[in-house]
Image (spheres, rainbow, N blue to C red):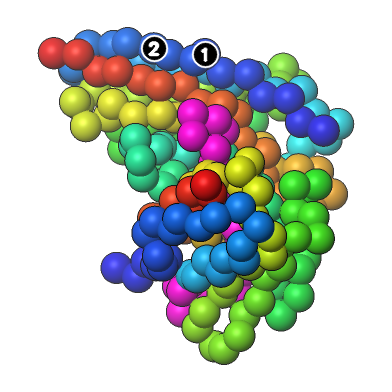
Amino acid sequence: GQNIDQPTEMTATEGAIVQINCTYQTSGFNGLFWYQQHAGEAPTFLSYNVLDGLEEKGRFSSFLSRSKGYSYLLLKELQMKDSASYLCAVRDPGGYQKVTFGTGTKLQVIP
Amino acid sequence: EPEVTQTPSHQVTQMGQEVILRCVPISNHLYFYWYRQILGQKVEFLVSFYNNEISEKSEIFDDQFSVERPDGSNFTLKIRSTKLEDSAMYFCASSEWPGLYEQYFGPGTRLTVT
């Protein structure tokens, strides 16, 4: 199975940079997703990493180290609307469709 | 922009009753999924569906659950005999292909079993 760990909550200031970490322990690796989920809404896709390194997409970047079982999501120039839960999810080995989600990190952006 | 739609947005049912949750995936997508999220807990994979059959399912997806694509647009999740612990938000998602392609989630159906 998959074990995914993320901090439960984080607080950051508007305009700042925040890094949300995710560690995973799996019997294999097939890719890692980051999703954003506002309260009461559906998850929305942010990024996908399958190779080591940094993927940048606007204010959001995601990093992966497969040897360390570690990823982070970096959010720059924080805005109040970035207050949400950020979900790390790992694709199960052996298949392409089953995804295991972490419990999510609830980020609060304060003025 | 194309989106996944789900109906109803909220369903209340009594324990032991059957419910059908409906989804309309994005029209050119080929892979369909159901997830659930119990209040305050993590999103959990239930099942994936491709080419009119289940391709992967989790241990949660037992005999009381079934999925169907009854026509060219709808994708349904049926729970035969609901239990209190089935109360959750159920999300449908679709993707063009599996693998690195992102899954687009619908807004969810909140199921309340009383």
Q: Residue at x 75, y 54 (%)?
A: B61
Q: Which residues are magenta?
A: B24-42
Q: Residue at x 56, y 69 (%)?
A: B20
What kind of element bears circle 2? strand
Q: What numbered label is drawn on residue A10?
A: 2
Q: What numbered label is drawn on residue B108?
A: none
Instruction: Tell whether B85 sits left or right of B110.
Output: right
What kind of element bears circle 1? loop
Residue A3 sits above or below residue B77 on the image? above
Residue B35 sits above or below residue B75 on the image? above
Q: Residue furthest bottom?
A: B71
Residue A98 visible in rendering: yes
Q: In the rendered structure, which amino acid carries the disc numbered 2?
A: Met
| Front one among A42 and B98 | A42
Query: Mark 1 — on which chain does it sit?
Result: A
Instruction: Tell whether A70 sits left or right of B87.
Output: right
- Asked if the residue under mark 2 is in contact with the one under mark 1, i.e. CB atoms within 8 Å, the reply is yes
| Front one among A58 and A93 | A93
Q: Residues within 10 Å of mark 1 (few under 14, many from 20)?
A: some
Q: Residue at x 28, y 26 (%)?
A: A83
Q: Which residue is mark 1?
A: A7
